[in-house]
Structure formats: C-alpha cells, structure tokens
Image (spheres, rainbow, N blue to C red):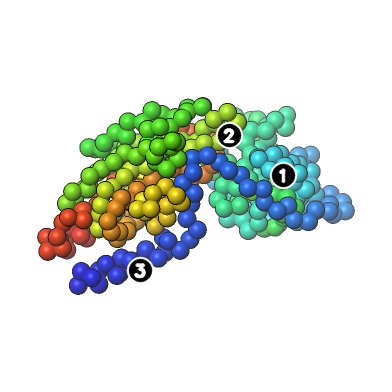
C-alpha cells in the first residue's frame, strides 16, 4: 500500500519535472534572441498608431485585445534588447486617482514588449520578457489628471495578437508565519554580495543553511529576497536550504513577489544539479501542493525571484515551509495520517 502511494507520488511529480526547469543562477545572463525579418510599415495611418491619435484606456480594470501587425513602427526602447522594428500600438491613460498600475500582456500570443511613457515621452517603465516572451510592468506610479502613454510593441520584428489588462497595482504584503525561523540574511541592496546562503552560486565555496531532518522536520523559514544591480549587472538573492537525508520532502508557502520554490538534487554537488520539482509562489499566491520522494541526500530547497525585474525589490518577504521525513525513520512508524499530513 505504501509502495502504491510512493508510485502515485512519483507519477504526480512528472508534471513538475516535465517543463523546462528554471535557472537557479543569481546573475542575469541575457541571451540575444534571433531578430526575425525586418518589419515594413503599411501605407497610411490608423487610430492607435502614435501618441497623436491613441486609443483610450477606460475605467480600470481595463482589457483590450487586437493585433499589432496592421500598425506602423514608431517606437522602440531597449529593455534590454535594441533595434526593434516591430509595429506598435498606443493607448492613452488619464488616471482619475493617484495609484500604481500593472500592465499585463501575458495572455498575448507573440513576443511582446511594453513601455509606459509620461506626457513628455519620458520612459517610466519598460519590459520585454516577463512571462515567457510576453511582457508585464507592475507598480508604475501614475497621478490623477496626468496623461500617460502605454505602447504595445514587439521584440525584433514580431507582431501579433495582444491581450492587455491594466489594473491598479495592489501590493502583496505578508508577515512572518507564527513560529517561523527568521532567515537572518541581510536584506540585499545595490552591490550586495551574498555569502550567507547563495548555495551553488557562492564562490569559492557553496553556502547553505543546513537542517538535520532527523525522523521528521517541519520548519517554516521567513526570509527576504529581491532583484538588485551589482555594477551594471542584474543579480537576485537566492536562498538555499540543505536537508541531509529525506524520504519525503514537501514544500509550501507564499511570497510577496513571484518566486520559484525549487527542490534540487544535491547528491552530485553543484555541477548543474537537477531541479526535481518547482513551483512559482506569490505574489500572495500560495503554493501548497509541491512534494518529492527522494532518497539519501543531500537535497536542497531553493527560493529565488522568478522574474528578472528590479520591481521585485530587495526585502520582499516570503514564508517557506519545509516538511520532510528522514531516512532513518522506519516505514512501520509511518502512519497514513502522518504521511498525508505532510502533503496538506
Ligand atoms: Ca516598435
Ligand atoms: Ca518579449
Ligand atoms: Ca534571502
Ligand atoms: Ca541569499
């Protein structure tokens, strides 16, 4: 019966392991994508082409769909890729209240870019790839009665169907779970160098926060993370927790910014260790159903921001609960209630 349960768990893990696992690097390594054919402007002008004749954004939340291919190329901003020739569409927003906004193009079906300009065409926010190759900017402050331009563009010469949702940005604010262990790492900052718990990203030596599982381990870690610049390079605070030996690992929790919660096979050391399970937690979107059935350790649980974007500010809080069964605990002592309790 227990074997059956293990097989069921192992099969259910296939869903976690089948997608391309995320990187656990702490430094951003942009890859230049192929640019594709240069886009040629169509003849004539249509509404939405430029800031002189934009579409209007109505009451928030506001959704708009369309296709950028019939518009002209008028705008480009490097974030970080340059030389876009893609056609672009312009929306005008005049807020009726001071707020921050999120512009979400994640449901679009081509390689999008998005920019937010003020009325003087000063750039306020820019993003290329937030959710796969689609774009999102969050927490962009806007002021009542002022005019803002939201430009939907494409990477390289890409155009296609866009789906834009503009919402008021409601910040996700968490507090440490009762009884949580405080991570203890300093809050990251510009130029921060993590020797505290950056795991396989630490040089010259790996740096883990280690836990002895014993028969059972049930611990919640309240930590902070974020994305920050080091010189001109983008870094993120990665937090690695080591478990010495386990026959079950369950990971749950939430974060103020989107974070990968990953279970990593540490048995082969830091040379490209396999990620065996992962999920995105936050913002205010808990993960509760991630587990793995491992063997002799060590196993690592890693928390890192899932998006390379400075809006994921240092000091963003997470609660990570790790429940594990140790290698030494005999199967006979495992009750169903206890095992199932691990995966709630
Ligand atoms: Ca363009
Ligand atoms: Ca993109
Ligand atoms: Ca941290
Ligand atoms: Ca860290």
Q: Earlier in the sequence, mark 2 or mark 3?
A: 3
Could you tell me which residue is drawn at 25 percent across and 58 percent down? 247
Disc 3: which residue: 11
* SS under mark 3: helix
Disc 2: which residue: 233
Disc 1: which residue: 90
* CB of mark 2 near ligand 4 (< 8 Å): no
Q: Earlier in the sequence, mark 1 or mark 2?
A: 1
* CB of mark 1 near ligand 1 (< 8 Å): no
Left or right: 297, with 16 as reference point: left
- Relative image position of residue 119 (x, y in whole percent): 71, 31
Kindly indicate whether the residue at mark 3 contacts the one at mark 2 (C-beta within 8 angstroms): no
Nearest to the observer: residue 52 or residue 298: 298
Q: Earlier in the sequence, mark 3 or mark 1?
A: 3
Vertical placement of 9 versus 29: above or below?
below
Vertical placement of 32 versus 124: above or below?
below
The image quarter in which residue 96 lies: top right
Regarding residue 13, the answer to whether it shows in the image is yes
* SS under mark 2: strand
* CB of mark 3 near ligand 4 (< 8 Å): no
Label 3 – label 1 distance at C-alpha? 47 Å
Nearest to the observer: residue 107 or residue 267: 267
- Relative image position of residue 95 (x, y in whole percent): 60, 35
- Relative image position of residue 315 (x, y in whole percent): 42, 31
Vertical placement of 70 versus 193: above or below?
below
Could you tell me which residue is drawn at 58 percent across and 55 percent down? 107
């Amino acid at each position: 019966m227990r074997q059956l349960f293990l097989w069921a768990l192992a099969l259910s893990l296939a869903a976690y392991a089948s997608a391309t696992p995320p990187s656990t690097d702490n430094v951003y390594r942009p890859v230049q994508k192929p640019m594709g054919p240069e886009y040629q402007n169509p003849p004539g002008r249509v509404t939405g082409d430029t800031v002189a004749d934009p579409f209007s954004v109505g009451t928030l939340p506001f959704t708009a769909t369309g296709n950028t291919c019939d518009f002209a190329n008028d705008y480009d901003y490097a974030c970080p890729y340059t030389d876009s020739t893609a056609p672009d569409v312009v929306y005008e927003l005049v807020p009726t209240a001071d707020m921050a906004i999120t512009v979400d193009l994640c449901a679009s079906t081509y390689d999008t870019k998005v920019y937010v300009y003020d009325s003087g065409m000063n750039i306020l926010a820019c993003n290329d790839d937030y959710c796969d190759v689609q774009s999102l900017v969050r927490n962009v402050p806007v002021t009542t009665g002022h005019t803002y331009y939201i430009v939907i563009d494409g990477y390289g010469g890409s155009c296609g169907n866009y789906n834009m949702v503009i919402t008021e940005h409601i910040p996700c604010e968490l507090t440490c779970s009762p009884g949580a262990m405080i991570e203890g790492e300093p809050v990251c900052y510009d130029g921060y160098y993590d020797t505290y718990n950056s795991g396989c990203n630490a040089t010259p030596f790996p740096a883990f926060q280690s836990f002895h599982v014993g028969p059972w381990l049930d611990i919640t870690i309240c930590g902070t993370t974020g994305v920050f610049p080091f010189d001109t390079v983008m870094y993120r605070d990665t937090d690695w927790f080591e478990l010495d030996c386990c026959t079950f690992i369950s990971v749950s929790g939430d974060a103020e910014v989107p974070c990968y919660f990953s279970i990593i096979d540490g048995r082969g050391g830091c040379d490209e260790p396999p990620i065996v399970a992962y999920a995105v937690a936050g913002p205010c979107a808990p993960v509760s159903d991630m587990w793995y059935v491992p063997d002799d350790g060590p196993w690592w649980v890693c928390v890192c921001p899932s998006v390379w974007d400075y809006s994921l500010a240092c000091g963003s809080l997470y609660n990570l609960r790790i429940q594990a069964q140790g290698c030494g605990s005999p199967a006979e002592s495992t009750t169903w209630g206890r095992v199932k309790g691990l995966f709630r």
